[in-house]
Amino acid sequence: MNTNHTIIETFELTKVYGMGDASVVALDHVSLAVQAGELVAIMGPSGSGKSTLMNILGCLSTPSSGKYILDGEDVSNLDKIQLAYIRNSKLGYIFQSYNLLPRTTALRNVMLPLVYDRSHKLPRNRWEQAARDMLGQVGLGDRMDHQPQELSGGQQQRVAIARALITDPVLLIADEPTGNLDSRSGEEIMRLILSLHAQGATIVIVTHDPVVAQYTERVIHLKDGHIDSVVHNAKVPLKESVAI
């Protein structure tokens, strides 16, 4: 892993909604960087701009001004089609509500991003085996043919993580990944996320939960659209915090 490689770099990111007297500045000149292999949390109260920042970092939105470099590519002014290509080829998402297709097996849910990956990193005849291998890695080798309603919340989130990893993204973005889970299931998901980080994954977690944030290397606190503070956490050894 090249730890000197910058995955995320933003310069003076600003996002304004509305016009004139009705305009709202959601992000105000936010500059930050995330290196390859980092595990970073973004926190802030409601209205702080964290969801807006997540949407820009996840190529779901573009800034009103400023620059966003993702894995060496300026994505600040790409159109919707270009952004969709970037999302499908470079990013993996983990959502609070899992966002799995109902009445669709775990295996098919994990395979879905490959259908939309126009970079064709993986030949079609290898999709199913890749999805099987990924589900095995997240501990669901015996649940591949189960539909979401047949799985617990923690198991559904594991399917979602497998889906996020299937295209071998350069960046994982997790939006409140334990928000819908009980404490035990939440701990299991954090074990998995920390294991992925230990293997070199670059992960940004958007969360309001300080318990989740404490396991990250850095916590970026937003307030009123600005970076209010950056806290560097003491490294929690994987062997003490998690065990898969």
Image (cartoon, rainbow, N blue to C red):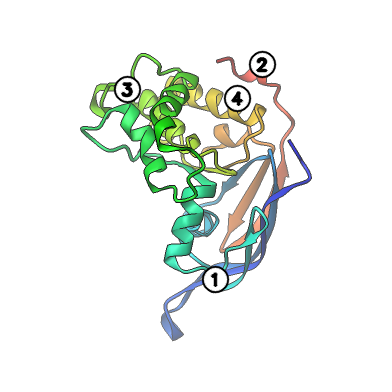
Q: Position of residue 178 (x, y in %)?
A: 45, 33
Q: CA distance from mark 1 to mark 3?
A: 40 Å
Q: Nearer the viewer, mark 3 or mark 4?
A: 4
- The local secondary structure at tag 3 comes to loop
Q: Residue furthest bottom?
A: 20
Give the residue drawn at x 40%, y 18%: 140
Q: Position of residue 182 (x, y in %)?
A: 40, 25
Amino acid beneath label 1 = Asn
Q: Earlier in the sequence, mark 2 or mark 1?
A: 1
Query: Is 166 displayed left or right of 108 in the figure?
Result: right
Q: Give the residue pinned by disc 1.
A: 77
Give residue 55's mark.
none
Give the residue drawn at x 63%, y 19%: 241
Q: Residues within 10 Å of mark 1 (few under 14, many from 20)?
A: some
Q: Earlier in the sequence, mark 2 or mark 3?
A: 3
Q: CA distance from mark 2 to mark 4?
A: 12 Å
Query: Is 157 displayed left or right of 41 in the figure?
Result: left
